[in-house]
Image: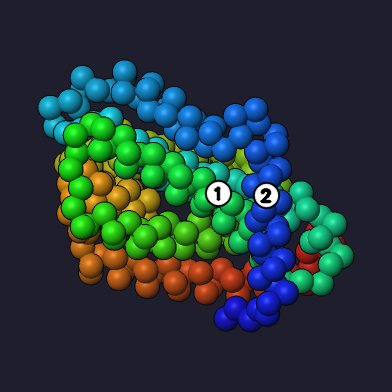
Amino acid sequence: MFHYNVKHFNLLRELTISQLRSKDASSLLGIIWSFLNPLLFLLVVFVMFNLRFQGSIENYGIYVLVGIVQYTHFSNCTVASMTVLKNMGQLTGQTLFPKELLIFSIILSRTYEFVIALGITIMFAYIAGIGFSFSILALPFVLVLQISLVLWVSLILSWIYLLARDIQHIFHVFLRLLIFICPIFYPPSFVEGNFWAELIIYINPLTHLIDFSRSIIINGELFSATAFCWLLLIHSILIYLSFKTFKRVEPRFGELL
């Protein structure tokens, strides 16, 4: 499906470095903000909901932080990828190279931040007294699923944005709703008995990825191998379909800018 040579990989590296530098240069805090942002969100949520879920959720602060970090990565990747073809219009419209590399560079640069934020989360978990087991070595598998999810969503959003700019506003509204339809600051059991709420939560792929990370970091347990394989299969199919559609629309990018 992907056919690239050494020049393409070198270009991807330079694009990724450029994304990292431009993002850091636009902020006084640079990459530190990528963790301070979810940490401030955690502080608000902890103050508001800690008493409500204190008895039912052990290590509530770390529980929420894991969810916020993964949600933030999904949000940052997809929002930036959606507009990258337009923002880098000179490259998109005139240069002959695989345009999906622009999206890959966004995802790689944001994933670099995600790995750092996840590492700090693990450090906080250790400070909080949570012991670790060898299950922590399974976190890279969760990272694979996380990247797979943001990849197919980003590929779809990037070309839809060129066709209909209003998708940006619609997607931002969706992200605000996503905070509540992911079990970030509440347990899935909170909606038990409500069929539609349970359905929405469990068909949300982020729900399962966050649950995988929590099982590893907080409980020291491996996630279900069957669930992982099913999610990997579904994401692989969606990556294939979204990539094929992206390449079909790619010849029109110049006229759509």
Are the residues at dot 1 and dot 2 in contact (C-beta closer than 8 Å)?
Answer: no
Which part of the image, by quadrant, shows the C terminus? bottom right
Residue that label 2 marks: 19
**What kind of residue is marked 1?**
Arg
Q: Disc 2 residue type?
A: Gln
The picture places residue 13, in percent across and down from the top left corner, at 66, 62
Identity of the residue drawn at 37% across and 60% down: 140
Q: Quadrant of residue 130?
A: top left
- Seen from the viewer's position, the closer of residues 41 and 203 is 41
Closer to the chain start, of discs 1 and 2, is 2
State the image quarter where residue 156 is shown. bottom right
> Which residue is located at x 68 percent, y 45 percent?
21
Q: Which residue is mark 1?
A: 110
Residue at the image position 39 percent from the left and 45 percent from the top: 118
The local crowd at label 1, few if under 14, some if 14 to 19, many if 20 or more residues have their Cα within 10 Å, is: many
**Residue 49 screen position, x and y as percent:** 27, 23
Horizontal side, residue 35 vs residue 85: left or right: left
| Residue 135: image location, x then y, percent | 22, 57
Q: Tell me the number on the disc at residue 149.
A: none
Task: Tell me where residue 205 appears, x and y as whole percent.
Answer: 37, 55
Residue in the foreground of this view, choosing between 152 and 9: 9
Compared to residue 167, the image places residue 141 above or below, namely below
**Label 2 environment density (alpha carbons within 10 Å; few <14, some 14–19, many ≥20):** some
